Amino acid sequence: MNIIIADDSAFVRSIISRAISTAIPEAKLTFCTNGKEAYDTYTEIKSDWLITDLLMPEMTGQELLLKLDQDGAKVKTIVISADVQKGTKVELEAFGIVKFINKPLTSDKIGELIELLKDENL
């Protein structure tokens, strides 16, 4: 399982990577600090999953999802963000995201993230 984790916060990337590495040790994690890096990485490795923040420099998570959608990418996506505006969530759902998880990350939210990644029916 290949997973791209795109978040400009090293702290958040660390929390997510520790949880995934512990629960799914076979997962191959790739880290990106903005949407442009994530887009370029996805075009190279065609990961199974994308975990992305929305508010990032250079290219936002929304811009990343729009670009991937325009390319016809079929990556399962989980958005983790503090941006909880209703309009934002509706826009993201149009891209077919698997889940929107609000920051801050708690142990329950991390558990939910892990369960989604393990769900073979998604």
Image (cartoon, rainbow, N blue to C red):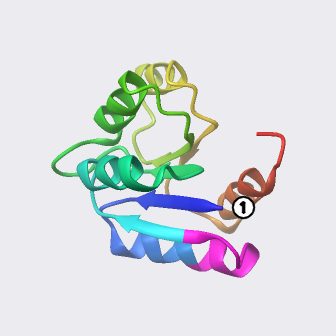
The image quadrant where one finds the C terminus is top right
Taking the spot 36% from the left edge, 43% from the top edge, the residue there is 54
Q: Which element type, helix, strand or loop, lies under badge 1?
A: helix
Determine whether, in the image, residue 114 is placed left or right of residue 105. Answer: right
Provide residue 98's location: percent of width, then percent of height.
64, 36
Q: Which residue is mark 1?
A: 114
The amino acid at mark 1 is Ile
Pick the front one: 77 or 55: 77
Instruction: Residue at the far left: name it.
Output: 58
Residue 97 position by quadrant:
top right
Taking the spot 55% from the left edge, 60% from the top edge, the residue there is 3
Q: Is residue 85 above or below residue 21?
A: above
Q: Residues within 10 Å of mark 1 (few under 14, many from 20)?
A: some
Q: Is residue 16 visible?
A: no
Q: Is residue 58 above or below residue 4?
A: above
Provide residue 39's location: percent of width, then percent of height.
32, 46
Pick the front one: 34 or 120: 120
Q: Is residue 118 above or below residue 88?
A: below
Magenta stretch: includes residue 27: yes
Taking the spot 24% from the left edge, 49% from the top edge, the residue there is 36
Provide residue 27's location: percent of width, then percent of height.
65, 70
Magenta stretch: includes residue 96: no
Provide residue 42's location: percent of width, then percent of height.
41, 50
Magenta residues, start to end: 18-28
Q: Is residue 22 visible?
A: yes
Taking the spot 36% from the left edge, 22% from the top edge, the residue there is 70
Residue 60 position by quadrant:
top left
Determine whether, in the image, residue 63 is placed left or right of residue 118. Answer: left
